[in-house]
Amino acid sequence: MNTKHPKRIVVKVGSSLVTNNGEGLDHAAIGMWAEQMAALLKSGHEVLMVSSGAIAEGMQRLGWTKRPQEIHQLQAAAAIGQMGLVQVYESCFARFNLHSAQILLTNADLANVERNANAKATLETLLKLGVVPIINENDTVVTDEIKFGDNDNLAALVSNLIQADLLVILTDQGGLYSADPRHHADASLLSHAIAGDPTLEKMAGGAASELSKGGMLTKVLAAKIAGQMGASTVIASGREPNVLTRLLVGEKIGTYLSPANKN
Ligand code: GLU
């Protein structure tokens, strides 16, 4: 395994991390990821961010303490929260003299030949310009990630769209464990596995929280999708100090999932 040399990196951050468990957008955490991504850009990598947190931030802005069941209320919350989300990313990257760009995508966009080509061309152009794309699902028109996923699947599709070398899924867990560590004290962290290994899916079943609909299963499935195009995936804690820059100098943090054809 080698996390040292991937050039193109997709970093996915989930709602509970981005909003510090729903307390509001975590400026400090986003600032630290921006600082690390700025360092990675300087050392020759290309970086893209897939961020959820729009619904969580929208709920916060509306004073909703419980996630509504009604899908249109969730979509409305996403539309409200997306404003705050991009404002924070924009100001955090600006501190490092970097521009960021908002990209809202859906599965259906990427499945359509013309839209897929347009999305790819836009992302490639942004990367050439040294701009950091901040990608989220377009929750106004679809509900895939709202219902199940918290953008894990979208992150894998983006990784494949731009043929990324590495997908980093940052979460509030230390990585993939043999059992849910919140309920099993003897659960052990898997440091390396093969993406697409069916035993991982059994191991990762369930384990989502009120804020993040994803849990580990969607992360393992995302690694499988990214692995099909040859990308490696790391699932690691977004609260680990300097997690991105440390991973990219080859430190072993969290769970490394290598594609089946190269490990
Ligand atoms: N795209 C959504 C967001 O950014 C997905 C996360 C969710 O369902 O809470 O909030």
Image (cartoon, rainbow, N blue to C red):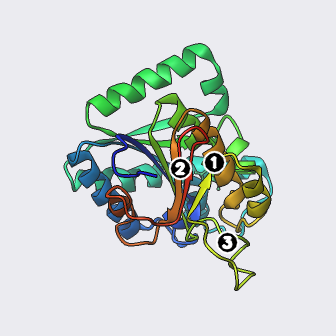
The residue at the point 72 percent across, 42 percent down is 144
Mark 1 lies on a secondary structure that is loop
Q: Earlier in the sequence, mark 1 or mark 2?
A: 1
**For mark 2, what is the residue?**
233
**For mark 1, what is the residue?**
195
Residue 213 visible (yes or no): no
Mark nearest the camera among 2 and 3 is 2
Residue 178 visible (yes or no): yes
Up the image or down, 36 lies above or below 189; here it is above
| Amino acid at dot 2 | Thr
Give the image location of residue 89, x and y in percent. 37, 53
Mark 1, Cα crowd under 10 Å, few <14 / some 14-19 / many 20+, is many
The answer to which image quadrant residue 67 occupies is bottom right
**For mark 3, what is the residue?**
65
Q: Please indicate whether residue 121 sits to the left or right of residue 60 in the image.
A: left
Mark nearest the camera among 1 and 2 is 1
Circles 3 and 1: CB distance less than 8 Å? no
Circles 1 and 2: CB distance less than 8 Å? yes
Q: Please indicate whether residue 158 sits to the left or right of residue 133 in the image.
A: right
| Amino acid at dot 1 | Ala
Query: What label does residue 118 carry, if any?
Result: none
Question: What is the spatial separation of the Cα atoms under label 2 and label 3, in whole angstroms?
Answer: 33 Å
Mark 3, Cα crowd under 10 Å, few <14 / some 14-19 / many 20+, is few
Q: Earlier in the sequence, mark 3 or mark 1?
A: 3
Within 8 Å: ligand 1 and the Cβ of disc 1? no
How many numbered marks appear?
Answer: 3
Give the image location of residue 219, x and y in percent. 64, 53
The residue at the point 66 percent across, 52 percent down is 220
